[in-house]
Amino acid sequence: MHWPEGCLAGLSCMTNLPGADLHWPEGYLAGLSCMTNLPGADLHWPEGCMAGTAMHELSLLENVREILENHAVSQKFSKVTKVTLEIGKLSSIEPDALRFGFDVVMKDSLAENAELIISDIAGLGICRQCGLEVELETSHDPCPHCGSPKVKVIQGADMKIKDLIVI
């Protein structure tokens, strides 16, 4: 498979048949969040390519960059040296994918070369049956006290920009 130069091949799931030869030109942000590479497949990922990084995380990072640029205008700063993000355990956001894509997405922006700090936020819910606050590993966990599946998530399902260090 060949994508034209400049394409953002944002495929959420792709099965690569044996003998397939995939090429992404240098600089591509090929956002493959799930890829099964069958035996015999020949994949070529050029240097700088972000194949294997979930497009969801790249999109989130682009939103962070846009927020930084908007705040730079309103708050009158010209450079961001550190970005701290809070990532909820229930958010379906992969911190490693954010770390991997951060420098690429922030290139040529006011946050170029900024340090990225990621804080994990636990998942919490309130059981609608017994009323207790419970820690959650997934958003579908039942209440560990009464077993009810009716648990309302109250923390850990989102991502926030916690703080910035700016110049």
Image (cartoon, rainbow, N blue to C red):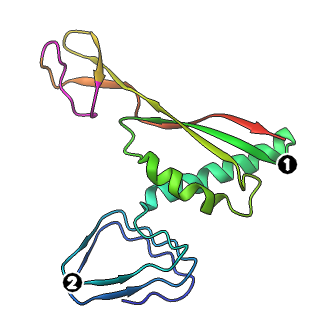
Rendering coords of residue 86 (x, y %): 52, 34
Query: Residue 91, relative to residue 142: is it above or below?
Result: below
The residue at 46%/54% (across/down) is 97
Q: Which SS class for mark 1? A: loop
The prevailing secondary structure element of the residues shown in magenta is loop
Give, as a three-letter code, the residue at label 1: Ser
Q: To which residue does mark 2 refer?
A: 17
The residue at 19%/13% (across/down) is 129
Query: Residue 13, relative to residue 93: is it above or below?
Result: below
Rendering coords of residue 54 (x, y %): 41, 60
Query: Residue 24, relative to residue 69: is it above or below?
Result: below
Q: Is residue 154 left or right of residue 132?
A: right
Q: To which residue does mark 1 refer?
A: 78
The alpha-carbon separation of the residues under discs 1 and 2 comes to 48 Å
> Looking at the figure, which quarter contains the N terminus?
bottom left
Q: Is residue 68 left or right of residue 77?
A: left
Task: Give the residue at the far right of this rendering.
Answer: 76
Query: Residue 122, relative to residue 75: is it above or below?
Result: above
Rendering coords of residue 101 (x, y %): 54, 58
Does 137 appear in magenta?
yes
Q: Which SS class for mark 2? A: loop
Residue stretch in magenta: 136-146
> Looking at the figure, which quarter contains the C terminus?
top right
In the image, 127 versus 26, the foreground residue is 26
Rendering coords of residue 154 (x, y %): 39, 23
